[in-house]
Image (tube, rainbow, N blue to C red):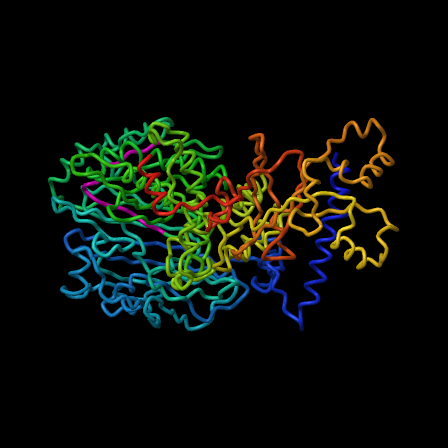
Amino acid sequence: MIRFKYALLSMLFLAGMQVFAQEKEQEERVGGHENTNSFRQLYNEMSTPNSYRTASGAPGHEYYQNEADYKMKIRLDDATQILTGSETITYHNNSPDDLEYLWVQLDQNVREPDSPAKDKNGDGVAPISQPGSFVSSYMGAPFDGGFKITKVSQNGRSLKYTKNWTMMRIDMGQPLKSGESYEFSIDWSYLVPEHTVDRARSGYETFADGNRGYVIAQFFPRMAVYNDVEGWQNYQFWGNGEFALPFGDYEVDITVPADHLLDGTGVLVNRKDVYSKEEWKRWERATKSYDKPVIIRTQAETEEIAKGNDSKTKTWKLRAENVRDFGFASSRRYLMDAQAVKFPQRDVMAISIYPPEGNPLWEEYSTKAVVQTLKTYSKFTFDYPYPKAISVHARSQGMEYPMICWNFGRPNEDGTYSDRTKYGMISVIIHEVGHNYFPMIVNSDERQWGWMDEGLDTFMQYLAEQEFGESFPEAIGQNKSYPSRRGAPSKIVPYMKGNQDFIAPIMSNPENVYQLGNNAYGKPATALNILRETIMGPELFDHAFKTYSQRWMFKHPSPEDFFRTMEDASAVDLDWYWRGWFYSTENVDIGVKEVKSYYVTDKVTKEGKERLARFGVSDPSTVEVVYVVDEDSEDFDPSLKGKSMLENSSTLKEYMMDNFTPAERANITEPKHLYKVVFEKPGGIPMPIIVEYEYADGTTEKVTYPAQIWRKNDSEVSKAIASEKEIVKITIDPDLETADVNPDNNSWPQPKKLGKFDKFKDNIKG
C-alpha cells in the first residue's frame, strides 16, 4: 500500500507540481534579492557567542558576575511614614575590567516632585481616575518623594558622588581593579508613598481604624549590574522596566513599633526575641506541619493588638545569602500562618501574612497557592533553594522580591467574594511567588527585557494554575479546569490581530511597548505554551527549559542564552519560531484555499503532454506514464467518476501486475480518491498545519504537517491526499492550538454565513 501510494504521488504529482512552480518562479523573478526566508538563520538578530556566553547558550569558561553585600540598619516611623536607613556596601569586582567608578540605583527618585517620569506619556486627561490619584495629580501638593541622601562615605571620609535622577555615580578616587573589593556607606531617608493611591510598587495602606500596613521595597540605594553584555546597566528607571541587580549577602536590622508583625527576605535570626511565647510555639509546630498551615498570630489576637498603639520599638534581624534584592512587610494589623514544604535537601516554609480584611479568603487559599507554586515550579526548573516563600496581602498590589511578595484579592466587607476575586488572588500569588525563580534566581535583566521574567513566569504560572486545580478540585467547583487568564493560545488572539500601530515585538524594552501586559506577559507565555504543546512536545521542551533554568540559576542570562539553550538541549531548530513570535509583530493565519479531486486516466492530457515535453519527450506513446486529471480540467471525462484507479488506467494496472506478486497485490488497498489541498498563509508567522480530515463514513483523522512546509513558499502550499474514503470536511487547527487569528478560512467547505434574518430565526429557535 505504502510503496504504491508514494510511487504514484511522488513521481507523477508532487514532483511535477514542484518543478513547474520552480520554473515559473525563475521566469517571473527579475534581479536579485536578500535572504528573507522565514527559516533563515537568526545570526543577524543575535549577538556573537564568546568566552562569556557560548553558542550553546551556556555560561562560557570566562563568565563572571560582580557581587554586592549589604549591612543595613533601618527605622520605620509609623507616625510620619518616613523610612530612615544606613547601609554599608561591599562591592566585589569579579570582572576582568578595572572599574573607574560605581553606579548605584536610586529608584525612589522616580517619585521626586520634578521627576521626568511624570511626563513620559502624552496621555492628556483620563476619563476616569481614582479619587486619591485625581487629587494628587490635579489638586494636591506634589508628593515629596525620592531619596534624601545625607551622607556618602568611606571609613568616615566623604566620597564624591553625582546624582543623575535615578542613578548615582560613586567616584572612588582610583579605579577598582579586577579581583578587588570596595566598601562604602550611604545614609538616607525617604517618605513612604501610599500605594493604594498611586499604585507604587511598595508603600503603605491605611486601614479603616487608622493603622497602616507597610510593604516596603526599593527602599535602599542598590548597586547596579556590571556585566559583559551592557557594561554598567545604568538605564534610568522610568517606571515600567523593572530591575537589574547583582547577587550578594544581606544583614538587615529593621526597627518598627513593638506591636508590629514583620517578616522579609532572609532568615529571621532573633525570632524568640520578637515573637510572643505562644507565637514561638506555633512557629515550631508549623515547621513540622506538611499537610496544612498553622496560624502563628490569630485574627482575634491581631484585632486586639490593633486597638493599641505601642510607643516602644522592636528590632527584627534578617540575614540572607546569595539574593539579588530585599523586601519586608510590617503592621500591627497583620496575622500570619505557615506550613512546611518538603524538598530533598531542605524544608521550605510557605507563609502568608494578611490583615483581617483578607479573611476568610486568605486563610483558606493563600498558603495553598504558595505550596503549589513551589512544587510545580521546582518540578519544571530546580528545587527551591531558599528557606521560605512569603505571600503578603496588599490591597492593590502584585509585586515580587526574594522570598517575599505582595498580592491583591480582598473579600467584601461581609466576607463574601466572587469567583473573579478568588481566582485573581490565587493567580497573582502563584505569579508573584513564581518570580522567585524568574528573575530572583534566574536573574535576567528586567530593565531591558521584561518578557524574560514576566513571560517565563506567566508561562509557568499557567502550568501551576492547572496543577492547582488538580490538587484542590474543591477550589474550582464546577469548572473542568482552572480558568487561567493567560497561557491558552485563544487568549492572545485579540491582541495579535489588533491594530499594528499599537503592537511592539516581544523583543522590545518595556518602556517602548504599548500594551505591557500582552507584550511581556501574555504573548511570550502563549508562545512558550505553543512551543511546548505543539512544536516541540512536552518531553523535549521540559528538558530544554529545565536545562536553561539550571544553567542560569544564580546568574545573569540574556535572551540569546535562552534561545540557544532551548535549541541546544532539544536538537530542534527554532530560529524561525523566535523570529516570528519574538522579533516581529506578525500573527498566525492559515487557511484552506482550495480542494480539488483528481482522477487517473489512459487519455493523454494536454497538461501531461506539456510536462513530458519539458522533460524532452515529444511523443507520449514512447513512454509509460499514468496521467492524472482534475475534475475542472478540459480533459476531464465524467465517466472516470465512480471507478477504481486500476479500472481507469491500463498502464497502472499493467504496472501492478508486472511488479507485484499476487500475495503482495492482495495486501495493497487501492485508494479510491486523490485530492489536492491548497493551504494558504495570510499570516506572517509560519506554523505547522494541523488538519482534521472528516470522511463520508463519519470518521476523522488528524494530521500535522511541519512548519518547514512553508520554507520554499511562504504564501501557499499544496498537499496530495490519496485516500480510501471520501473527504467531506477539512478543518485547520481544530483544537485551537496555534493562536490562529482568523477562523473564517479554517474550514472546507466554508460554512454558510447567515444573513441577519437567518440569524434572527436561529435566535428565535434557540
Q: Total of numbered circles in the picture?
A: 0
Asked if the magenta segment contains residue 331, the reply would be: yes
Q: Position of residue 405 (x, y in %)?
A: 33, 46
Quadrant location of the N terminus in the rendered image: top right
- For the point 67% across and 48% down, which residue is it? 630
Q: Is residue 66 above or below residue 434?
A: below
79 lies left or right of 632: left
Q: Is residue 32 above or below residue 317?
A: below
Q: Is residue 502 above or below residue 31?
A: above
Front one among 434 and 306? 434
- For the point 58% across and 59% down, which residue is it? 52
Secondary structure that dominates the magenta span: strand
Front one among 493 and 311? 493
691 lies left or right of 296: right
Front one among 490 and 47? 490
Q: Position of residue 65 (x, y in %)?
A: 50, 57
Q: Position of residue 727 (x, y in %)?
A: 60, 38
Asked if the magenta segment contains residue 397, the reply would be: no
Front one among 458 and 192? 458
Residue 373 lies in quadrant: top left
Res. 269 in view: no
Res. 642 in view: yes
- For the point 51% across and 55% down, which residue is it? 581
Residue 266 lies in quadrant: top left
Q: Position of residue 55 (x, y in %)?
A: 62, 56
Task: State the extent of the magenta-drawn residues as a range.
Answer: 326-339
Quadrant location of the C terminus in the rendered image: top left
